Image (spheres, rainbow, N blue to C red):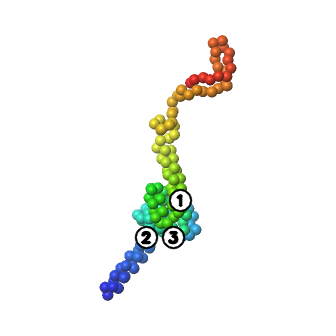
Amino acid sequence: MKTFTKLAIAAGIFTASLTAMAAFSTGMSAAQVEAEVKKSVTEGQDVSAVVAAAKAAGISVDSLATALSAAGVSTDAIQSAMTTAGYDAKQVGDTVAVLKLVNESKSTAAGNPTNAPGNPGITTGPSNAPSWSNAPASTPSGGGGGGVSRS
């Protein structure tokens, strides 16, 4: 009787863990993958388990990585989980590199616009750079041709 009880408990745990897994299927659209990933991450499922379920269903690197990023998973965690699950490491690395650039540009646009003071390499004030022009330059005699002026 003890063996039967242990098997019943183990079967119950196994069934519960299967129902908790992300429900991916072959041929899902990117929007469907994103919705399933968001649901799974929100429910607190382990990222590695979500990635393994996606890999088993044949979900592409790009769709899965993009969905994980949109769900708030860090790019480092995405890369680690996907390569551990058996996705092609080079393809994962390339996709994660693009995601990092996208995330950085969103962060910059939201928090520090490109013309904001303090943004490295960006100036908002006057410059001492030469200004090239074909307009007549002022001369003491009033005439002039094209020239270089300093602004």
Judging depth in this view, the residue of 84 and 43 nearest the camera is 84
Report if the CB atoms under discs 1 and 3 are less than 8 Å apart: no
Which residue occupies 48% across, 63% down?
83
Label drawn at residue 90: 1
Judging depth in this view, the residue of 85 and 49 nearest the camera is 85
Name the amino acid, label 2: Ala
Q: Secondary structure at mark 2?
A: helix
The location of residue 36, given as percent across then percent down, is: 49, 65
Which residue occupies 43% across, 70% down?
20
Crowdedness near tag 2: few (<14), some (14–19) or many (≥20) residues, C-alpha within 10 Å: some
Crowdedness near tag 1: few (<14), some (14–19) or many (≥20) residues, C-alpha within 10 Å: few
In the rendered image, which quarter contains the C terminus? top right
The location of residue 4, given as percent across then percent down, is: 35, 85
The location of residue 107, given as percent across then percent down, is: 48, 47
Mark nearer the viewer, 2 or 1:
1
Label drawn at residue 56: 3
Label drawn at residue 20: 2
Q: CA gap, disc 2 to disc 1? A: 30 Å
N-terminal of the pair, mark 2 or mark 3, is 2
